Amino acid sequence: MIEKRQAKRIVRPLNIRFCIVHENPPKWNISSIIGDISALGVKFIAPLDLKEKILHLEIKSPRLVPRTLKLEAVVLESKTSRLPTFYEIRAKFINLSQENKRDLSLLE
């Protein structure tokens, strides 16, 4: 079966950290490694179940140095991973600015 994607999926070891929107005070979670990323969303591993949460994300890449890509995303799927006490997260980017879109294209 041919995969029909709207955006190119990039598989690269990028660091990501996140916090839940409206969490007061915000608790930034341990950096994780991205499974893959595209112009539309991201997959990563997290130590918590983030089902239906909205997240602030910070992504670091050598292609963007010295900047950090700051995005918002809504979690579409949060399922138990093969690693005990971790979850596989699939999230869709929301409220992307033109600068965010440009930075995401630089990751390709």
Image (cartoon, rainbow, N blue to C red):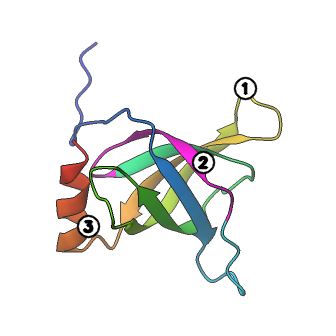
- Give the amino acid at mark 1: Arg
Local crowd size for mark 2, using a 10 Å CA cut-off: few (<14), some (14–19), many (≥20)? some
Quadrant in which the C terminus appears: top left
Q: SS class of the residue under badge 3?
A: helix
Q: Which mark is residue 70?
A: none
Task: Give me the residue at 43% from left, 47% from top.
Answer: 42
Task: Give me the residue at 70% from left, 32% from top.
Answer: 81
Mark 3 vs mark 2, foreground winner is 2
Residue linked to disc 1: 82
Quadrant in which the N terminus appears: top left
Q: Which mark is residue 32?
A: 2
| Separation of marks 3 and 2 at Cα, in angstroms | 20 Å
Q: Is residue 8 above or below residue 90?
A: above
Span shown in magenta: 29-40
- Give the amino acid at mark 2: Ser
Tell which circle, 1 or 3, labels the residue nearer the N-terminal end: 1
- Give the amino acid at mark 3: Asn
Q: SS class of the residue under badge 1?
A: loop
Residue linked to disc 3: 100
Q: Is residue 79 above or below residue 29?
A: above
| Separation of marks 1 and 2 at Cα, in angstroms | 15 Å
Q: Is residue 11 above or below residue 28?
A: above
Left-right relation of 79 to 103: right
Local crowd size for mark 3, using a 10 Å CA cut-off: few (<14), some (14–19), many (≥20)? some
Is 41 magenta? The answer is: no
Q: Residue furthest front?
A: 66
Q: Residue furthest bottom?
A: 24
